[in-house]
Amino acid sequence: CCSFGIPTALKGWMLLPYREPGILSGYRPAGLSAGACLRSVFQLSNETLNIWTHLLPAGYFLGTLVRRLRAARADPGARALLLFLGTCCLYPLASGGAHALGAMAGPGRHRGYCCDYAALGLYGLGSALAYSAYAFPLEWVGSTFHDFYVPVAVVNTVLSTGLSCYSRFLEAERPRLSKASRILAFVYPYIFDSIPIFYRLSRCAAGGCSEGSIRLHFRHSLCALLTFLILTSRLPERLAPGTFDLIGHSHQLFHVCGILGTHFQLEAVSMDMAERRGRLPIPSSLETFGSLGIGAAASLAILGICFLRLRPEPISREKAH
Ligand SMILES: [Zn+2]
């Protein structure tokens, strides 16, 4: 149990109330019960908009998924899109839930965020499935890179979920390292998954582009860059600590930008699917359901390990420190 310094980290979060740099007020009291956390969703705190900026879009994507399911359930060519859409519903839902439960005592808070990261990892895998089926550069179709693209994306998802969940164990004692490893855990798979899109965008910049979806791919890539810059710069609250506590701090902007990116990404992939039908092979159900199933099973296993590690401290030990 004592590898990785986990027990010391466990002690740490019992002592320190959670604070974000630049956000001075609006914190919910620490150590709320799950029920009190859920009730707090309807009261204004510095987490309220973090919750709703993801819960409302989750509902919107769910509506889109239901509509698409009715229209294209029997179409094997739409499988990758439907699975991708499923992951687009899952990640904002998990994130909204994690933010809602963020004021729970000790492990509860971290467990919520681990679910959030696992869902984000699956969203990355869902994107890779959709890119492989609809958005690959036509000259790369059937190449070795195309053959290994989805399997590598599955491995990346597992590594990313593992690293980001592990980063929760570092939060109390080494917050900077914790944030940095979490950013790495999401930036690296994003860059790998986006290679086909970056290639198409660069070819377009060089003057050879006729596809209507490129404009949308450019928009969602720009949103992804903005989410990264907002998250790492902590603007605007870094310039005026205390001013954006309830409305307008970087995490809310990060959510909005990320969701806009997902919206444009979904539009781009849908347009690719319509425009390029018949030009890319339809992936088998093993490639689509199988890959996402393996990714989901591995993520659940990682969550299981984290949940076991993140057990509440015995009362006596808590008092002793
Ligand atoms: Zn968030």
Image: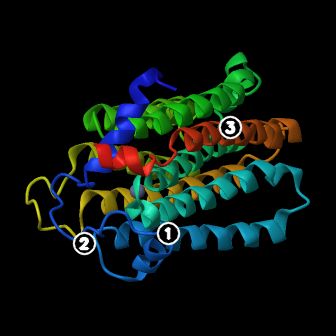
Marks 2/3 in contact by CB < 8 Å: the verdict is: no
Taking the spot 50% from the left edge, 75% from the top edge, the residue there is 35
Taking the spot 34% from the left edge, 68% from the top edge, the residue there is 47
The single residue placed furthest to the top in the displayed view is 144
In which quadrant will I find the C terminus?
Answer: top left
Please name the residue that numbered disc 2 is placed on.
247
Q: Amino acid at mark 2?
A: Ile
Q: Nearer the viewer, mark 2 or mark 3?
A: 3
Label 2 residue SS: loop
As measured in the structure, the alpha-carbon distance from the residue carrying label 2 to the one carrying label 3 is 37 Å
Label 1: few (<14), some (14–19) or many (≥20) C-alpha neighbours in 10 Å = some
Q: Nearer the viewer, mark 3 or mark 1?
A: 1
Label 1 residue SS: helix
In screen coordinates, is 274 left or right of 12? right
Residue 298 appears in which quarter of the rendering? Answer: top right
Taking the spot 8% from the left edge, 55% from the top edge, the residue there is 239
- Foreground residue among 94 and 279: 94
Q: Which mark is residue 301?
A: 3
Label 3: few (<14), some (14–19) or many (≥20) C-alpha neighbours in 10 Å = some
Marks 3/1 in contact by CB < 8 Å: the verdict is: no
Q: Amino acid at mark 3?
A: Ala
As measured in the structure, the alpha-carbon distance from the residue carrying label 3 to the one carrying label 1 is 23 Å
Label 3 residue SS: helix
Please name the residue that numbered disc 1 is placed on.
34
* Mark 2 or mark 3: whose residue is earlier in sequence: 2
- Foreground residue among 172 and 242: 172
